[in-house]
Image (cartoon, rainbow, N blue to C red):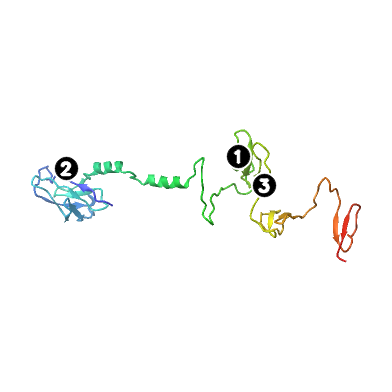
Amino acid sequence: MARFIFGGTTDTAAETATGARLPNATGTVWSSPAEDATQLTDLVDMNGNPVSMLTADKNGMVPSFYGPEGHSYVWADFGAGRYMMQPSDTAKRLDDHISSSDPHGDRNYADNLFDRALPKTGASVAVDSGRTWLTVRVPAGDGDAKGNALRLTDGTTTYTRVANDGALFIDTVGAHTPLSLGAPITGTGTFITCHPGRASESAEGSVFTVNGDGSVVTAGTVTAQNLGSARVFSGPNPPPSPRIGDVWVKYGE
């Protein structure tokens, strides 16, 4: 912390209790007017020379001096008691403070925040590897099916949205647009998995799986208008308890 300047003004004089000036008098500087106050000897004159006490000039005035670091007020004693001295450079400090480019550092702080913020339009985000760009905290428990973490709208109609309970609804705006999914994948990998519990990329436990080679695996019955209730079997032996409409492709003998 910088030193404050004291003295050198018309109201800082070495005087007796009756107000008589004390030319060339020597005084001490204290941390407070209390009896247990500490004498301050870390003083510096205006030429940069260390001094431990104050010396009035030939007119009894106290010349300017730098007080100890960390002390914005001091008490001087020239024999008539301790009297507080206020800094004489307060106005200059205030002017310097006001005229500085960033006196509180708030502009630099705000600039750093703005650098990390996104504009309403034209945003471009560079996501570092291994880091999450955006996390939305949603209600715990059963979530909130009415609220949305993301919602597209033209002002009248709501389209694609991600609900606060995690549900995803895909509705395109305007003309027909086919749903298209694409990702790097191998022929032996899974492309789509649907689980009865938590989502997983693994096909194990999935009730519906689309593999990278295009094959579809379901845990239940596939129903379509042209399938009816027919069942299809393959292997060397006929299916047990066959029903009308069953299809058996024999192979393996």
Give the numbered dot on residue 152: 1
Mark 2 nearby-residue class (10 Å; few <14, some 14–19, many ≥20): few
Ranked by sequence position, the earlier of labels 3 and 2 is 2
Label 3: state its secondary structure. loop
* Residue at image coords 27%, 41%: 95
Amino acid carrying mark 1 in the image: Leu
Mark 2 and mark 1: span between their CA atoms? 69 Å
Of the two numbered discs 2 and 1 on the same chain, state the one appearing first in sequence: 2
Taking the spot 64% from the left edge, 43% from the top edge, the residue there is: 145
Which image quadrant for residue 175? Answer: top right
> Residue 48 at what x, y percent from top left?
18, 53
Mark 2 vs 1: CB contact within 8 A: no
Identified at 60% across, 37% down, the residue is 153
For mark 2, what is the residue? 9
Of the pair 213 and 112, the residue shown nearer to us? 213
- State the residue position of label 3: 180
In the image, taking residue 102 as reference, residue 112 lies left or right, namely right
Residue 50 screen position, x and y as percent: 17, 56
Rendered image: mark on residue 99: none
Q: Name which quarter of the figure residue 251 lies in.
A: bottom right
Q: CA distance from mark 3 to mark 1?
A: 18 Å
Q: In the image, is residue 204 above or below residue 171?
A: below
The amino acid type of the residue labelled 3 equals Ser
Structural crowding at the residue carrying mark 3, measured as other residues with C-alpha within 10 Å and reported as few (<14), some (14–19) or many (≥20): few
Residue drawn at 21 percent across, 56 percent down: 42
The span from disc 3 to disc 2 (Cα, nearest Å) is 82 Å
- Which of the image's four quarters has the C terminus? bottom right
